[in-house]
Image (cartoon, grey):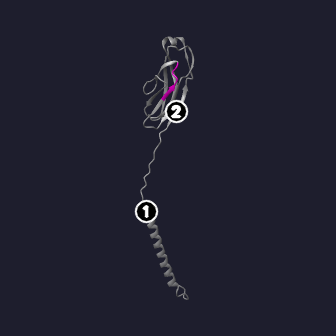
Amino acid sequence: MCPPKLKWCGVGVAAFAAALVFHLFLSAQETFAVIKTARLTVSSRVLPYIQVNLISQVSEIQITEADIQRGYLDVPSASRLEVKTNSPSGYMLAFEGSLWPFKEVRIQGLASPLQLNSGQAVVFQPSVKGKVSMNLSYRFILSENTQPGSYAWPLSISVHPG
C-alpha cells in the first residue's frame, strides 16, 4: 500500500515488478542457452618399462688345472638379478663379452637355456606379472690353450623391451 500523498507509488512498484520479472526471464533464457551437452572421450597409453636390479655378480673366476683337464668350468649362481616390467610382450636379455679363454658359454636359469658361441647372444623372456628373480649359472667350455689363473668376469648383461 502506498501512503496517501504518493499516488504514483502503485504504478512505480508495478513497473519495477514487471521490469524485475522481465530481467529474471532474460537471465534465465541466457543461462539455459549456455547449457550444452558434450561427450568427452579420454584415453591413456601406459609406456612399457623395465627395471633391473643386479643382486650379485661374480667379478672374477679361477681356472684350475683340474678345470683344464675336464675341459670346462662350472660357476653356479654367478649372477642373481631381479627384473620387473609391465610390458605384455616380455623382454630380451642380452649377454655380451669376450669369450677368450673360452670357446663357448652355456647359461642356465632363464626361460630357456642359452648358448653363447660368439661375443653376444640374446634370449627372449616372457612377460610375468610382478618381479622375476633369476639365479643364473654358467658352464664355460675352455679353449685348448687356456692357462690356469684368475680371469675377470667375461660377460655383461643388459635388458631390452621385447
Compared with 157, 69 (above or below) is above
Total marks shown come to 2
Q: Which residues are magenta?
A: 94-100
Q: Is 107 included in the stretch rendered in magenta?
A: no
Circle 1 sits on which residue?
36
> Please, what is the three-letter code of the amino acid marked with disc 2?
Val
Name the residue at 49% across, 22% down.
137
Residue 95 part of the magenta-drawn span: yes
Q: Residue 160: x percent and y percent?
A: 48, 34
* Residue 147 at x, y percent in the picture: 55, 13
Of helix, strand and loop, which one carries label 1? loop
Q: CA distance from mark 2 to mark 1?
A: 50 Å
Q: Which percent across, then down, holds residue 86?
A: 46, 38
> Mark number for residue 52?
2
Give the vertical position of 151 relative to 89 (above or below): above
**Residue 79 image label:** none
Q: Are marks 2 and 1 in contact (CB under 8 Å)?
A: no
Callout 2 secondary element:
strand
Q: Which percent across, then down, holds residue 105?
A: 48, 21
Q: Look at 45% across and 26% down and name the residue there.
A: 110
Characterize the local packing of mark 1: few (<14), some (14-19) or many (20 or more) Cα atoms within 10 angstroms.
few
